[in-house]
Image (tube, rainbow, N blue to C red):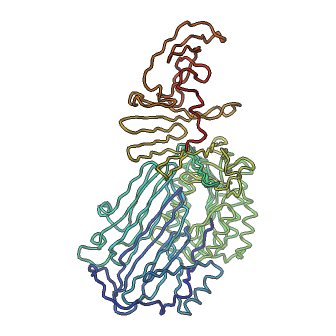
């Protein structure tokens, strides 16, 4: 799954679309007048719909906007959509008076030239550019003839990441005018089952949001719909402008009966891993802080505020130090110190007295911090079961000491040698963010831009919270040799609380019945291994020609036309219909090293009295009492199991005393009950012979 880099994308429409040359339909009077405030400069945007379909954390989103030109002359209509930076556009079309013009997404190398060429030739082109912290803006404008309608449809996709325990769908709402039909819908399907689902809007009060919002979830499915009326969109009861301007955020999480979940579809698999309840691994943190002159003022004060708050959140078994760099490099302590209350108080005093000065020597600042972490480990001054992290904050480019970005990257890479991650925080816009990001990624970390707003200190604290609670280090996800092909990244330096590891791949054999997925990592006290047994065996429910497929790994209830089917993960399937008639199909799992037997299904009836006397078949003939008599109990071939004579259905049969498990009350362990076993495959007890009830296929 490829990800495009937004600031370097354009979307150019096919060459037949010139800004001044759209096919025009004759001017015509529109029969229906729009409500006041819905027409701006002759253009009415009468419909905007955002449709989100999420399956297994993967979001497929379609934004559709429809507009009409009520003016007597051609008018320009703009289409703006702000998208998450982690998303990628997969399709765009323009439809004018029923004629559809497809778009073509171009990548970095050709984007700028083709965009400029399209504009110079009077053609329509869309451009993607930066638009704030989490978003990039796609925009396109076209001329629409008098009386004509235009439909914009943009499709984009995104893999949702788990952040602080929840998956987040971030939608920017800004229609710029009242829209007669405005709607956001999200349908979520998660095979693990949905545990929480919520939605919030930054631009509307909770009371008004509640009247326009519906949300629900049950089992695997969740639904959110936001559909404000025209009056609900107005900024005031008599206003013609819209209050829909801000963020609409949907968050959810899934059930986690076990740390891992593996899903298989058409020979491919996705492995999700997110253990809970593990103790936090102690961490050794070095903060490398830019104190050059450009940090003067609010940036420095916000940095100090954030560091003071971070110090409050340090655990006593953590170790820390501060490296300050400007033209020179200074340190708080010569080596890492434990985060005891006394040391934390001294650290606060040090942070309060930080002041800006001089130039920017990124290279020496980072190398000093890396050396300090390496030395602490080599000299056993930090706990053996601890993890090291280096966090750098800078607001500018290196201009002192080694200033070549590629050389700094080489120096840092050689110093770290893959032993711990580097996280780079870029404060503001006057810096080489690509350099910071590249250097962090090649050292198993990431970069984050800190925006120069009033909440910059909260942004810094928020980032630290993401890495403050490592639960595992040196995580490796393994699969049987020769079972998996085309595997994505499967080793991770850290797993942090509230996040998730995702590995995808292709099965070497689509018909593989099962395989094991092992996750190994170093915990706070010992090494841990999590094993998930993957069984793609299917449960197929038919409704005429339509079918729904599930597996024994699911927990789901399906209800339709008086029939209810409930699958309880790895346990049983309960089928209920009519007036309380219930069957239970139990998955009996045999000991894996059993050489002869395999897992099997047991079919049980919870209340046979409700079955008709006409019910027959292998089980049905015994749903109601029948006459039998047992006599002449005598020793059999096995001294512990006596034989006897049973008279049933006018047959005299030899039967043997034994025991069997009854799983009606306890589906996992069962209850041991005494019974008589009939020989010769039940001949004489059942109607006909056993082969009458064997079929090659159920369908």
Instruction: From the viewer's side, name the closer residue of 162 and 182.
Output: 182
Q: Where does residue 486 sit, x and y in percent of width and height?
A: 70, 58
Res 515 quadrant in image: top right
Number of numbered discs on residues: 0
Give the camera-side residue of 388 and 37.
Answer: 37
Q: Residue at x 49, y 82 (%)?
A: 140
Query: Which residue is at a point 66% across and 12% down the rendered structure image?
Result: 638
Q: Residue 21, relative to residue 592: is it above or below?
A: below
Relative vertical location of residue 121 with respect to residue 626 in this rendering, above or below: below
- Between 662 and 615, which is closer to the camera in this rendering? 615
- With respect to residue 353, does 517 lie above or below? above
Q: x%, y% of residue 17?
A: 52, 88
> Does 606 appear above or below 193?
above
Q: At 65% across and 34% down in the image, what residue appears? A: 598
Q: Nearer the viewer, residue 500 or 522?
A: 500
* Residue that protrudes farthest toward the left in the picture: 238
Q: Position of residue 351 (x, y in %)?
A: 55, 62
Q: Describe residue 59's horizontal placement relative to residue 593 as left or right.
A: left
Q: Position of residue 147 (x, y in %)?
A: 36, 87
**Quadrant in the picture for the C terminus:** top right
Quadrant holding the N terminus? bottom right
């Amino acid at each position: 799954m490829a990800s495009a880099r937004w600031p370097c994308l354009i979307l150019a429409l096919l060459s037949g679309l010139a800004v001044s040359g759209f096919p025009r339909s004759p001017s015509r009077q529109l029969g229906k007048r729009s409500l006041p405030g819905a027409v701006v400069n002759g253009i009415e945007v009468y419909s905007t719909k955002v449709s989100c379909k999420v399956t297994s954390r993967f979001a497929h989103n379609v934004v559709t906007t429809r507009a009409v030109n009520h003016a007597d002359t051609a008018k320009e209509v703009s289409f703006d959509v702000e998208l998450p930076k982690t998303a990628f556009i997969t399709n765009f079309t323009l439809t004018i008076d029923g004629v559809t013009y497809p778009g073509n997404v171009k990548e970095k190398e050709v984007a700028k030239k083709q965009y400029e060429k399209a504009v110079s030739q009077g053609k329509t082109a869309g451009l993607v550019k930066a638009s704030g912290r989490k978003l990039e803006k796609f925009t396109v404008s076209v001329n629409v003839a008098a009386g004509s309608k235009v439909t914009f449809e943009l499709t984009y996709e995104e893999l949702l990441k788990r952040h602080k325990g929840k998956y987040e769908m971030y939608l920017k709402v800004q229609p710029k005018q009242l829209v007669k039909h405005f709607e956001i819908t999200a349908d979520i399907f998660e095979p693990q089952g949905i545990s929480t689902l919520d939605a919030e809007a930054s631009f509307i009060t909770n009371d008004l949001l509640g009247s326009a919002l519906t949300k629900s979830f049950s089992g695997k499915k969740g639904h959110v719909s936001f559909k404000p009326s025209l009056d609900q969109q107005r900024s005031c009861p008599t206003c013609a402008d819209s209050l829909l301007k801000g963020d609409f955020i949907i968050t959810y999480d899934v059930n986690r009966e076990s740390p891992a979940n593996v899903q298989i579809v058409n020979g491919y698999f996705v492995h999700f891993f997110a253990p809970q309840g593990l103790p936090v691994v102690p961490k050794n943190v070095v903060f490398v802080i830019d104190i050059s002159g450009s940090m003067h003022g609010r940036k420095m004060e916000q940095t100090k505020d954030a560091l003071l708050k971070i110090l409050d959140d340090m655990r006593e078994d953590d170790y820390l130090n501060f490296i300050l760099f400007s033209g020179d490099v200074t340190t708080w302590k010569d080596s890492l110190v434990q985060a005891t209350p006394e040391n934390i108080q001294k650290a606060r005093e040090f942070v309060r007295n930080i002041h800006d000065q001089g130039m920017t020597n990124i290279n020496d600042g980072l190398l000093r911090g890396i050396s300090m972490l390496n030395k602490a480990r080599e000299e056993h001054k930090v706990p053996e079961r601890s993890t090291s992290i280096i966090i750098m904050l800078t607001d500018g480019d290196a201009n002192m000491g080694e200033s070549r970005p590629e050389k700094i990257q080489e120096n840092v890479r050689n110093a770290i040698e893959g032993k711990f991650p580097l996280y780079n925080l870029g404060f503001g816009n006057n810096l080489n963010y690509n350099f910071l990001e590249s250097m962090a990624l090649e050292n198993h970390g990431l970069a984050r831009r800190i925006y120069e707003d009033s909440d910059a200190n909260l942004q810094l604290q928020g980032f630290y919270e993401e890495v403050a609670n490592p639960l595992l280090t040196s995580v490796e996800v393994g699969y049987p040799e020769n079972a998996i092909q085309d595997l994505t990244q499967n080793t991770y330096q850290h797993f942090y609380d509230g996040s998730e590891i995702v590995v995808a791949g292709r099965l070497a054999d689509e018909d593989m019945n099962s395989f094991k997925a092992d996750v190994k990592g170093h915990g706070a006290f010992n090494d841990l291994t999590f094993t998930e047994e993957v069984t793609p065996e299917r449960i197929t429910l038919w409704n005429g020609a339509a079918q729904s497929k599930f597996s024994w790994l699911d927990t789901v209830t399906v209800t339709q036309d008086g029939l209810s089917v409930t699958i309880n993960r790895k346990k049983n399937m309960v089928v209920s219909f009519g007036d309380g008639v219930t069957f239970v199909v139990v998955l009996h799992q045999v000991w894996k090293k059993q050489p002869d037997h395999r897992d099997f299904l047991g079919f049980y009836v919870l209340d046979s009295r409700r079955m008709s006397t006409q019910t027959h078949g292998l089980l049905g003939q015994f749903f109601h009492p029948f006459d039998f008599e047992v006599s002449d109990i005598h020793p059999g071939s096995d001294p512990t199991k006596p034989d006897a004579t049973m008279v049933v259905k006018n047959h005299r049969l030899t039967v043997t005393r034994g025991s069997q498990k009854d799983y009606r009350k306890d589906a996992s362990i069962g209850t041991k009950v005494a019974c008589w076993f009939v020989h010769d495959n039940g001949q004489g007890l059942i109607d006909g012979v056993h082969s009458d009830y064997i079929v090659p296929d159920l369908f």
